[in-house]
Image (spheres, rainbow, N blue to C red):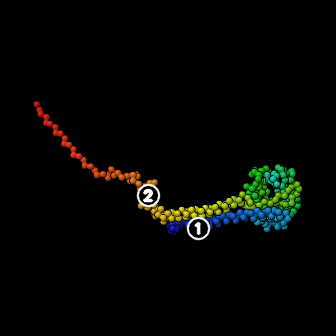
Amino acid sequence: MYRFLLTPRWWGINLFAVLAIPVCLFMGSWQLSRFEDRVDSHKEQEQSAERASEATAEPLERLLPVTKQSSGRAARATGTYDIGESLLVPERRLDGKRGFYVLNLLRTDQGKALPVVRGWLPGSADPARVPEPPSGEVTVTGALQPSETRSEASGGPAVPKGQLSVISAAALVNVVPYDVYDGWITQQRSQRPMKPVPPVAPANTGLDADAFQNLGYTAEWFVFAGFVVFMWFRLFRREAELAKDVELGLLPEDPGGPEGQGQAGERPGTPVEPGASGSSDEPDPSDRPAEQAEPAEPAEQAEPAYRS
């Protein structure tokens, strides 16, 4: 009854199912693991943000370059503020309120400058409201952050002089005449009336839209695996029913063969009733013997004409 499973057609179906199901399960598990990694990184970022103000700061050089693991960790650097280069970063929100960041560059002994976000102020960017940075050599501590990208910026690409749309070394290279670290820190203890800016998770981490996209892909791959199983059982059931009908004599063994071919609209093996199209009792006119033609009558001979 199940001999059809040994046909070449079913060898191909079985091979496809055996390969497709593990692949779908593997891809679904991989997407699920990526979502779980995002959840873990989100928890780590929240914990790092809570510990940023109390954690023991590490030297900046040990945490560079900024990675997903070093982002959000407490870093410290020693140097002097470039008082003449106070920059404002507009269109930044904190606790649902619109405001701006206050950024200053810390010139370190290594010859590079470190962007330091000293705090946040509400309202429009106004240099007159910004308190002066400390003078002389200072040691600054804060949460380390990676350089921002254009897509992460809230403000427009064109900003007035003295302002930045994104905090990155690429944006600062045309603003200051010295090298800048590829990263920045946000102080967790700010001068009043500024408020500290909490660290944020780096791109492609945390529970963002991409994380839930991974969760959607997980469901899709598992659905694909279930669909392959469903289609295999459906085809198997249909073939088994056909094989059973053949064993019971309800269908010929080769319905598509010459003996099983009937007229259009007829099932194979159905007896043809008298009078049906193509089976009339009347003989076909083409089968009748051709009748012999009757001999033609001789034409009357014309009487000879006599001259008078």
- SS state under label 2: loop
- Residue at mark 1: 18
Q: Earlier in the sequence, mark 2 or mark 1?
A: 1
Q: Are marks 2 and 1 in contact (CB under 8 Å)?
A: no
Would you place residue 284 above or below residue 19 in this image?
Answer: above
Residue 255 left/right relative to 55: left
In percent of the image, x 75 and y 58: which residue is there? 148
Residue at image location 69% in from the left, 64% down from the top: 32
Closer to the eye: label 2 or 1: 2
89 vs 247: above or below = above
Measured from the top left, where is residue 106 in percent x and y?
Answer: 83, 60
For the C terminus, the quadrant is top left
Q: Amino acid at mark 1?
A: Val
- Residue 126 drawn at (x, y percent): 84, 50
Is residue 252 in sight in this rendering? yes
User: Between residues 97 and 215, which one lies in front from this camera angle?
Assistant: 215
Residue underneath mark 2: 270
Looking at the image, the residue that sits furthest to the left is: 308
Between 234 and 228, the one lying in front of the other is 234
Q: Nearer the viewer, residue 193 or 210?
A: 210
Identity of the residue furthest to the top in this view: 308
Place of residue 107 in the rendered image (x, y in percent of width and height, measured from the top left): 83, 61
CA gap between label 2 and label 1 equals 41 Å
Crowding at mark 2 (Cα within 10 Å: few <14, some 14-19, many 20+): few
Please tell me which residue is depicted at 77% across the width and 63% down the height of the picture.
43
The correct choice, above or below, for 305 with respect to 77 in the image is above
Q: Residue at x 58, y 65 (%)?
A: 17
Q: Secondary structure at mark 1?
A: helix
